Image (cartoon, rainbow, N blue to C red):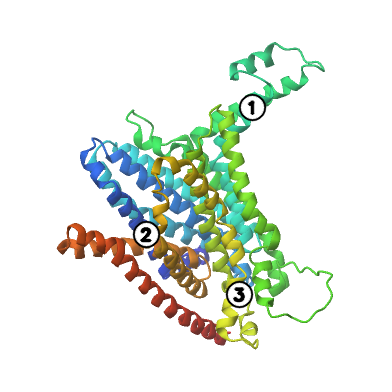
Amino acid sequence: MNDRATAFLVRSLRQESRYISHHVVRVGMASVILILFAANVVSYSVRAGAGSQFASKVMNCCYWFVTLLGGIYFSTAIVEEKEEQTLPLLKMTGASSFTILLGKSGPRLVSVLLLLLVVAPFLMLAATLGGVLQQGILTAFLGIFIYSIMLCQLGLLASVLSSDSQRAFSKMLLAWLMIELAAWWSWLLAMGTQYGGNFKNTEAAQQYLSTTIMNKDTIGRLAMSWLHMQFQWLYEVSTPRTLFDNLSMYLFSFRTMEFWQPQMTFHLILAIVFFACSWALFEPCTAQAVGEGPDSGKKVTRRQRKSKRAWRQALVWKSWQHITGGHLWFWMRLVGMPAIITAVILISAWAIDEPVEEEVLAGILMFSGVVIFIANFATLLGRVFNNEIHQQTLPSLLMLPKSRNALCGQMVLGLAPAILASAACFVCGFTLMVRATMHLSNGGMMNVFREPWFYNVFFWIAATMYFGLYLSIRLRYGGMLLAILAMWVVGPTIVISGLTVLSIGLSGSAMRDFFENVLPVFLAMLEVVFCAWMHFTIIRSLNSVAEQG
């Protein structure tokens, strides 16, 4: 058994190390850190103890890379075997459940841990800048290391419980929100029960609970006071046990603190519990996939509709209904998301008894809108061709009496309403920002629409879409996210570095005109050529994939 487990683990490590996407992610994170450093290099040179600020940005960048990309990567460990129907083959080799789980999760964890090594030179630079203790850096690094182990096992459990990658990632995301934001949820509920019981503070609620006799007139306030004390206790317990709340504290602290923190113990215990649950549930949750073959894990719904002839926009409807979610999710993106985010902001401000400034609300809505738009952009466009390839329906689609351009165009067109609706949150925030700053900027905000760089952004988004569609054909998971990383992080870093060297001979108004007018127009022309080239490349890739079967 040990020999089989070792062989399976080594094979998985070799297979994972061949993926070019892993190296792209590492280069992308290094590029993000370089951009953060370049944006603040002037302030670092004149600020005393700037190392703590830089180290905090480096570690937070690492935290979000591990959370977002690692979350997608970890949650597909077992699901990809279910979707590709290779799980029965693994069982036929005689591999036990423990061997399969270790072999599928171990290499992914190693790949993410190698990502952490990318930040080592930057942390050494932070220590050189001063203002941060080496013990704080090591504590923060160990905290992310243990956090990665916990996240890996959480993704493994979600992958065991789910039948497809979307459900696995959704379950993992919900569990992550409950674990890492436990302190925030507890604080919000504690403030709500404090207000519901009409208590001035926690001490007043505790005194009322200990001195009041229960009867029909006081049972409501007693219940509120008891709930408030429980949520307050949960807040105090969960605050030191989440990396989200303590990562910066490790770096900014100058007092002597223990190297091993409660957050590490908590996450390590969770990792063990998650792996044990995955081990215990592996056989029951995969028995259907192993026993029923290609149709396992897929629910077939029969809708009572009359048979009709297929109309010209059938592919548009297919993408609209089965990828974007139809009308329900359209209105959720268009109205639900802005309403939910605004409600959370207002409730949080009410809980701390602080007014919400219009600029703050606009900034949060704009930032949330960017995140929501990127998530929908990457998810929907990444699935439009990927699903057809891995569900083996692409050859049938290519046999339709349509040109390749019309077929691809209709499939992408069905996603357009959902993608545009996901920008509603950003549009609301931008509108509020324009309204709040109109009297201060004297029309300066409107001047943005006259700049060539503003329109160049749309060409860049189109280039990102084409590149992501191509990668989604070649890669099973994360193709669109890699395209976003390459086009919006790695690409600008290379372009800015090259232009810095080329602009040595320019100065004054010539350099300003070049960067404000010539460069965006030139880049727009390059992006148009790139989109045309990628369009024909996508058509050829679809044909080759369909021929391979």
Q: Nearer the viewer, mark 1 or mark 2?
A: 2
Residue 459 appears in the figure: yes
Amino acid beneath label 3: Met
The image's mark for residue 451 is 2
Quadrant in the picture for the N terminus: bottom right
What is the quadrant of residue 342 in the picture? Answer: top right
Residue 93 appears in the figure: no
Q: Are the residues flagged by discs 1 and 3 in contact, CB closer than 8 Å?
A: no
Left/right placement of residue 64 relative to residue 377 reads left
Q: Residue at x 61, y 61 (%)?
A: 166
Sort mark 3 into few (<14), some (14-19) or many (20+) by Cα contacts within 10 Å: many
Amino acid beneath label 2: Glu
Q: Are the residues flagged by discs 1 and 2 in contact, CB closer than 8 Å?
A: no
Q: Secondary structure at mark 1?
A: helix
Sort mark 2 into few (<14), some (14-19) or many (20+) by Cα contacts within 10 Å: few
Residue on which the image places disc 3: 411
Q: Secondary structure at mark 2?
A: loop
Determine the residue located farthest toward the left in the rendered image: 505
Give 482 or 465, whichever is nearer the viewer. 465
Residue on which the image places disc 1: 230
Quadrant in the picture for the C terminus: bottom right
Q: Residue at x 38, y 36 (%)?
A: 250
User: Is the residue 19 above or below the residue 489 in the image?
Assistant: below
Q: Position of residue 450 (x, y in %)?
A: 39, 59
The image's mark for residue 541 is none
Left/right placement of residue 378 relative to residue 453 reads right
Amino acid beneath label 1: Gln
